[in-house]
Amino acid sequence: MALCVDVGVAQTQLPFSLLEDPFFDGVSELISPGGARRIISEAHARGGINTRKVEIPESKGFNEPILLLTKDAGGEVHYRCLDAASPGGAQLKHVLQAGLVSDPPETVNTRPADPSRGTWYRVL
């Protein structure tokens, strides 16, 4: 199983709805292509947790980073970060966009009223 996520640059916000997916059961970190472990941490506001975030330094310099997350046999989640302008990133972006208009939608958009500001994700 793989998960495709359209994310922000460097520090990525992970929507609660994404983290509630069974894909993330027991997952507290993401593993980079080089083997670095990136902790999924909580961000607080007004006395409560308002989001979860993870640093993805590989996305620096990308205009539109897309993460491809895969889970290994041991349950650890590895990521690969692609720019939507690259051939592989463009293919993943197309998959995300197609999922927005499928019936029923296969891509989740956290801000349907303003898709350009939301996080999109889809289980592949």
Image (spheres, rainbow, N blue to C red):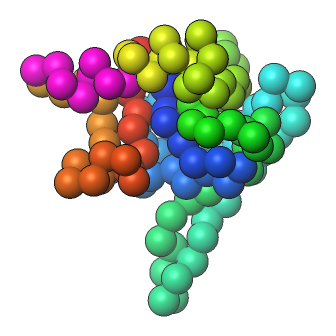
Q: Is residue 7 visible?
A: yes
* Residue drawn at (63%, 17%) of the image: 86
Using residue 21 as the reference point, say whether residue 28 is left or right of it. Answer: right
Of residues 114 and 21, the one drawn nearer to the viewer in this rendering: 114
Of residues 117 and 36, the one drawn nearer to the viewer in this rendering: 117
Of residues 105 and 117, the one drawn nearer to the viewer in this rendering: 117
Q: Position of residue 6 (x, y in %)?
A: 49, 36
The picture quadrant where one finds residue 44 is bottom right
Residue 18 lies within the magenta run: no
Q: Which residues are magenta?
A: 96-103
The picture quadrant where one finds residue 36 is top right
Q: Is residue 40 visible?
A: no
Q: Position of residue 72 (x, y in %)?
A: 66, 16
Residue 100 lies within the magenta run: yes
Of residues 82 and 39, the one drawn nearer to the viewer in this rendering: 82
Asked if 118 appears above or below 86 in the picture, the reply is below
Number of labels in the image equals: 0
